């Protein structure tokens, strides 16, 4: 973030913008330049935290005993002191503070872009190699930069598809949309009044389409949208139910029906059950629907 400068006054650090206006008053005994939208700081109690440009604590003081001074492509190492075993254990988080690599290692080597396929980590004397590209399919909605924004009709035309379908992943309840054989993310809980599809790049450097409300274009962070799938209350078989909004000719159907992401699955899949289909997807994509992004 070149528009901001860390400065020191009376032994404490704060932040100024490019005009010299104080954005964060001097209050930290240690403060690093912003990376991926966050700065590592320490308070007078020598505790670590990550803050955003508004001085909000994204990773609060005292949660970890140590933090990486900066993020690398949206990832940072953290250290937690395990009181029960009287030792420090390491893990990796993203820019929302989510733990993406479990905090269970005795040491993790520094993160470098060129070694994301093989980050060295240790459990005792045993060395493991962490492949951060394995988790790059998690399209985190943070640190967003907008490459282009399309109307639904424009996006359908460019992607050679007739409709966009908003669905629920039954494995994690996350909402996503499909266009043809591809998958995008959703940044709205209900039907957008004026839906658009933005091509965005996030704090991990991941590029993907984001279905959103036009008035939300420009926002850099969105919560993960989830819908809890309700169990069927009736065994009725010949009733086509879906969990998607059908953006076809700007018409949206079945918006309130989130009960079954596959509808009448055996009829729809020619006699195959949902379990059969999910098993096949699991074999093909290792239980990660977003992995389809890698198949071009």
Image (tube, rainbow, N blue to C red):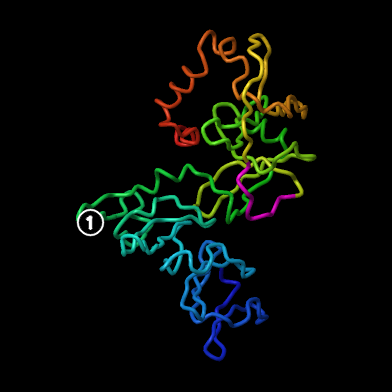
Q: Is residue 120 magenta?
A: no
Could you say where residue 263 lies in the image, as x and y percent from the top left?
Answer: 63, 18
The image shows residue 135 at horizontal and vertical percentages of 43, 45
- The vertical placement of 176 against 64, above or below, is above
Q: Residues within 10 Å of mark 1 (few under 14, many from 20)?
A: few
Residue visible at 51% across and 65% down?
35
Task: Report which quarter residue 177 is drawn in.
Answer: top right
Please tell me which residue is depicted at 77% across the width and 30% down the height of the picture.
250
> Looking at the magenta stretch, what is its main secondary structure?
loop
Provide residue 283's location: percent of width, then percent of height. 39, 25
In the displayed image of the protein, which residue is found farthest to the bottom? 10
Tell me: residue 143, above or below residue 267. Answer: below
Asked where in the image residue 231 lies, by quadrant, the reply is: top right
Residue at 62% across / 70% down in the picture?
55
Q: Which residue was labeled with disc 1?
A: 124
From the top left corner, tell me how far across and down residue 104 is, in percent: 34, 53
Q: Is residue 122 left or right of residue 145?
A: left
Name the one closer to the observer, 233 or 273: 233
Q: Residue at x 74, y 29 (%)?
A: 256
Circle 1: element type? loop
Nearest the viewer among 129 and 86 is: 86
Quarter holding the N terminus is bottom right
- Choose between 76 and 63: the one closer to the eye: 63
Where are the magenta residues, as a range? 216-225
Seen as rendered, the residue at the extreme right is 193
């Amino acid at each position: 973030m070149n528009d901001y400068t860390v400065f020191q006054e009376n032994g404490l650090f704060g932040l100024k913008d490019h005009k010299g206006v104080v954005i964060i008053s001097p209050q930290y005994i240690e403060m690093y330049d912003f990376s991926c939208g966050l700065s590592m700081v320490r308070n007078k109690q020598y505790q670590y935290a990550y803050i955003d440009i508004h001085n909000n604590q994204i990773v609060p003081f005292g949660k970890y005993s140590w933090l990486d001074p900066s993020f690398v492509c949206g990832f940072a190492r953290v250290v937690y002191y395990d009181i029960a075993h009287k030792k420090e254990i390491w893990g990796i988080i993203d820019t929302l503070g989510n733990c993406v690599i479990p905090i269970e290692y005795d040491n993790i080597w520094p993160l470098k872009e060129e070694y994301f396929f093989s980050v060295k980590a240790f459990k005792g004397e045993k060395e493991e190699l962490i492949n951060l590209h394995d988790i790059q399919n998690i399209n985190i909605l943070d640190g967003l930069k907008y490459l282009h924004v399309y109307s639904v009709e424009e996006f359908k035309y460019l992607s050679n598809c007739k409709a966009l379908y908003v669905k629920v992943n039954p494995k994690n309840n996350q909402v996503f949309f499909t266009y043809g054989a591809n998958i995008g993310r959703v940044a709205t809980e209900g039907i957008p009044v004026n839906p658009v599809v933005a091509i965005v790049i996030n704090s991990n450097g991941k590029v993907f389409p984001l279905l959103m409300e036009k008035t939300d274009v420009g926002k850099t962070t969105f919560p993960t949208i989830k819908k809890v799938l309700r169990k069927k209350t009736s065994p009725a078989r010949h009733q086509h139910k879906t969990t998607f909004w059908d953006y076809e000719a700007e018409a949206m159907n079945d918006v309130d029906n989130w009960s079954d992401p596959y509808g009448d699955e055996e009829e729809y899949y020619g006699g195959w059950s949902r379990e059969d289909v999910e098993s096949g997807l699991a074999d093909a994509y290792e239980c990660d629907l977003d992995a389809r992004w890698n198949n071009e």
